[in-house]
Image: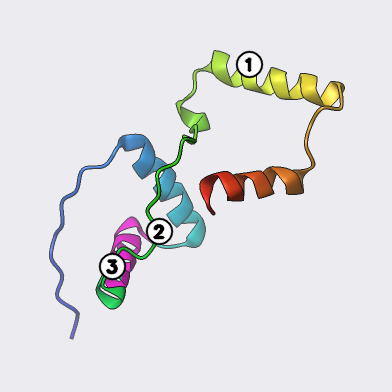
Amino acid sequence: MAAKTTNVYIRVEPEVKIAAEKVFNQLGIPFSTAVNLFLKQVVMKQCIPFELTVSSHHPVFFDNLTEGEKDAIIAEGYQEYRKKQGKVVADVFADLEKDYKL
């Protein structure tokens, strides 16, 4: 016998939904399954299943930038590379983990 389901209607920012769907697609799970997993964790743990913090850092979604903004970021990165001012990849990821508490 199939499990009974109910519909849930939520409002989310379009760019957040699109970014989340990309992650879920990479994981091979539908959006509704991911939401269901979240809700099951809430029930099991009797709390929100992750730490809530306030961050002064705000992620920039590359897809939301204009072509000019994208070009400027790429050009800046290229100039840093040419001047050997870039960071080692491991350091970049360490900074991201620290800044965003990943």
Which mark's residue is nearer the viewer, 1 or 2? 2
Position of 18 with respect to 82 (left or right) is: left
Mark 3: few, some, or many residues within 10 Å (few <14, many ≥20)? few
Instruction: Give how far apart the Cα atoms at labels 2 and 3 are.
Output: 10 Å
Q: Toward which corner of the image does residue 92 lie, by quadrant?
A: top right
Q: Pick the quarter of the image with the C terminus.
A: bottom right
Residue at 79%, 42% (x, y): give it.
88
Badge 3 element:
loop
Single out the residue that lies furthest toward the top.
68
Instruction: Give how far apart the Cα atoms at labels 1 and 2 are.
Output: 34 Å
Q: Pick the quarter of the image with the N terminus.
A: bottom left
**Residue type, mark 3 in image:** Cys
Badge 1 element:
helix
Instruction: Give how far apart the Cα atoms at labels 1 and 3 are.
Output: 42 Å
Q: Position of residue 84 (x, y in %)?
A: 86, 27
Position of 24 with respect to 34 (left or right) is: right
Segment tinted magenta in the rendering: 30-41
Is residue 65 shown above or below 6? above
Q: Position of residue 13 (x, y in %)?
A: 30, 37
Residue 35 on the magenta segment: yes
Q: Earlier in the sequence, mark 1 or mark 2?
A: 2
**Residue type, mark 2 in image:** Glu
**Residue type, mark 1 in image:** Ala
Q: Position of residue 22 (x, y in %)?
A: 46, 48
Q: How many marks?
A: 3
Residue at 32%, 64% (x, y): give it.
38
Q: Earlier in the sequence, mark 1 or mark 3?
A: 3
Query: Residue 51: which disc?
Result: 2
